[in-house]
């Protein structure tokens, strides 16, 4: 499903997506409110969501969509590079963030990625996320959270590595465990945090102060 207030943008996106095997555009909406109503009747797998729209904006619509039962995956598309849009979209539950000037092949790859249940966040955006926490442009929203108590020490180790934007292979090398074991820990810690994917887990780790941007992971007293 495509949600964008510009008819030409919707038409262009629909043409790109509709030309792909195994993909079909089930609906188009010009604002967040119409998108929410349409999602209930069309039950899309993925929603391409614009950020700045009249009425219900893309951030608000994303938060409401991802709270639905059997929620669709949301891929946020925007022409705006400001960090605040990236972070607010991810905090709202988006599974990915892509600029509208991306190549069509990148768009299709991003849709397939989030449709498969993965998160789509480029290393550049991950780096900006870390930098923004480091210089105070984005601040933690919660000081403590009981969800952390549910994590095992090793799951915390994996989460802190994950929050640095490292791959499973890099995490395994840093912790001296296999890539398969890293996957097991990631799959275990996500539901404990209430995170749908690695992106949301990263946001939570920084929000809770579990990782200090630009420095070593936060070490709590025994």
Image (cartoon, helix red, strand yellow):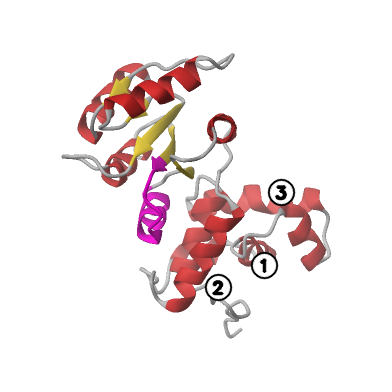
In the figure, 160 relative to 220: above or below?
above
- In this view, the residue in front, 95 or 219, is 95
> Can you see residue 71?
no
When asked about the image quadrant of residue 71, the answer is top left
Q: Determine contact: label 1, label 3, CB under 8 Å.
A: no
Please identify the quarter of the rendering in which residue 142 is found: bottom left
Residue range of the region highlighted in magenta in the rendering? 77-92
x%, y% of residue 183? 72, 48
Residue in the image at 51% along x and 39% along y = 102
Disc 3 crowd, CA 10 A, few/some/many (<14, 14-19, 20+)? few
* Residue 211 badge: 2
Report which residue position mark 1 lands on.
157
Residue under pointer 3 = 184
Residue occupying image coordinates x 55% and y 73%: 211
Q: What is the x, y in percent for residue 161?
A: 66, 65
Q: In the rendered view of the protein, which quadrant contains the C terminus?
A: bottom right
Q: Of helix, strand and loop, which one carries label 1?
A: helix
Viewer-nearest residue: 80 or 172: 80
The disc, 2 or 1, on the residue closer to the chain's N-terminal end is 1
Residue 57 in view (yes/no):
yes
Distance from Cα at disc 2 to Cα at disc 1: 10 Å
Q: Does residue 72 sit above or below 90 in this rendering?
A: above
Residue plotted at (64% across, 64% down): 152
Badge 1: few (under 14), some or many (20 or more) residues near its Cα, within 10 Å?
some
């Amino acid at each position: 499903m495509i949600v964008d207030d510009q008819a030409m943008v919707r038409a262009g996106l629909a043409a790109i997506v509709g030309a792909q095997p195994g993909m079909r555009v089930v609906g188009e909406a010009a604002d967040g409110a119409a998108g929410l109503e349409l999602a209930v009747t069309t039950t899309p797998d993925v929603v391409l969501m614009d950020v700045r729209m009249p009425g219900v904006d893309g951030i608000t619509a994303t938060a409401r969509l991802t709270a639905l039962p059997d929620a669709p995956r949301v891929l946020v598309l925007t022409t705006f590079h400001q960090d605040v849009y990236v972070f607010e979209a991810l905090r709202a539950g988006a599974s990915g963030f892509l600029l509208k000037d991306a190549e069509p092949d990148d768009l299709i790859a991003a849709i397939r990625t989030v449709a498969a249940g993965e998160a789509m966040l480029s290393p550049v955006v991950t780096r900006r996320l870390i930098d923004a926490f480091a210089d105070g442009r984005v601040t933690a929203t919660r000081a403590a959270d009981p969800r952390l108590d549910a994590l095992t020490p090793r799951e915390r180790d994996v989460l802190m590595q994950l929050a640095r934007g490292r791959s499973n292979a890099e995490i395994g090398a840093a912790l001296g465990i296999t890539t398969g074991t890293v996957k097991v820990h990631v799959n275990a810690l996500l539901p404990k945090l209430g995170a749908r994917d690695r992106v949301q887990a990263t946001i939570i780790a920084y929000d809770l102060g579990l990782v200090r941007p630009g420095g070593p992971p936060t070490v709590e007293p025994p």
